[in-house]
Amino acid sequence: MNNQPSKPSRQRWSAMELTGLALVLSSLAALLYAPDSLSGLFTAITARVCPIVVDVFLTSDVGVAIVVSVIVGRVLERLGFTDALIRIFLPVMGTMGINPSVIIPSVYNILGDINASGKIAGPILVKAGATRDEIKLSIATMIQNPQSFATFAIGLVALTAFGINPLPVVLLSIFLPLIVVPFLLSRTLYRDTKAVELETLPRFTPQTPMMKVLFDSGIEGMQLLLLVIIPAVAVVFTLIGVLDFLGVWAAIEAGIGSLLSALAIEPTTGVLSVLVSPTLAVAQLPALTGIDPRLVVGGFVLANSGFPLSVVLGQVPATWAESTGLPEKDGLIAAVLGCGIRLTTAAALAYWLTPFILR
């Protein structure tokens, strides 16, 4: 008796085969009637991908900053930084019934880089026994914080230039979400959380010799840049290139600017934060004149987050899948949720807080 499972019949066309046939026929039609269209598509994609991959990540200080942030993060870890954070946040997270390790990525994010945060802090959550919901909660919380200290520092200059008291903005937009977002999400979407006792947690400070930490972290940073971040960025901007070739990306980009304006976020720098670089966005804020201070506050809050979209849609899911085993779909949903929370926070602070903090 043959107990082997029967193989699907090759006589019947599968959905993917029909899709492939449509692509073959459309490609042949393009070669016959519009021979320049395929090369135009490739050119449009290259024009979008090349400036970001080469000019931003390979030959500018952004790529170097990612490598350096991994080095700094690993050195901090070796010097007991993680264990100190666990002790600080354990009482607060314990009262909410949440593993304190969920805060670690956000703090590393502020001090270093969002990609290094996932690379370094992701395994810490796994080692601390965080549930899958707590890992997703951690990603959504991490999006609420600036992805580099440079963005935070330059943003403070922008607020001061417009006569805005930066202290309330910083407290409400960067530090308060460390507590509020985990609390809200653990009561609504990500309920599988649990408090832990300090005695049940391992020590997170490695005993690796310091020189080995320095050299190994440099290698780790380059691997993260070349094997995870750049491929993820290339995928996202390839899709943007396709949309640009189809003639719809300009409308999408304009729609993003209109949405940001409605949310009291300065649209020009806001689009830069969402699509290119938050650091570049806040650097341009002080040069603007004659604009509503609410737009500056909204722009600052948006820039000090996990954007741009290439990070949210590509780098975060890929990095966290590699470091924690969390499915990329789950990481993506958590990151997008975090972006929604951040946009809401930016609008709320811009409209309601700004009148009280003008000097």
Image (cartoon, grey):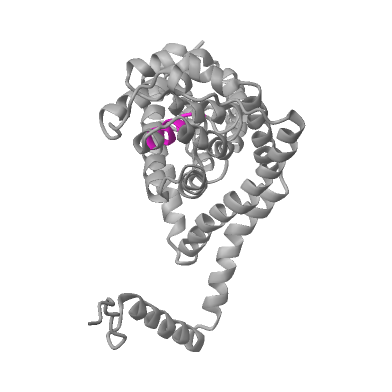
The N terminus lies in quadrant: bottom left
Q: Which residues are magenta?
A: 136-145
Q: Is residue 320 visible?
A: yes
User: Where residue 146 sits: x, y (%)?
Assistant: 53, 30
Where is residue 262 drawn, in percent x and y? 37, 36
**What is the quadrant of residue 99 in the picture?**
top left
x and y percentages locating residue 200 in the rendered image? 43, 22
Q: Residue at x 48, y 46 (%)?
A: 309
Q: Examine the structure image and report whether residue 332 is included in the region drawn in magenta.
A: no
* Magenta stretch, overall SS: helix
Q: Quadrant of residue 247?
A: bottom left
Q: Is residue 144 magenta?
A: yes
Q: Is residue 264 above or below residue 176?
A: below
173 over 47 or under it: above or below: above
In x, y percent, where is residue 121? Answer: 53, 33
Residue located 32% across and 21% down the image: 97
116, above or below 179, in the image: below
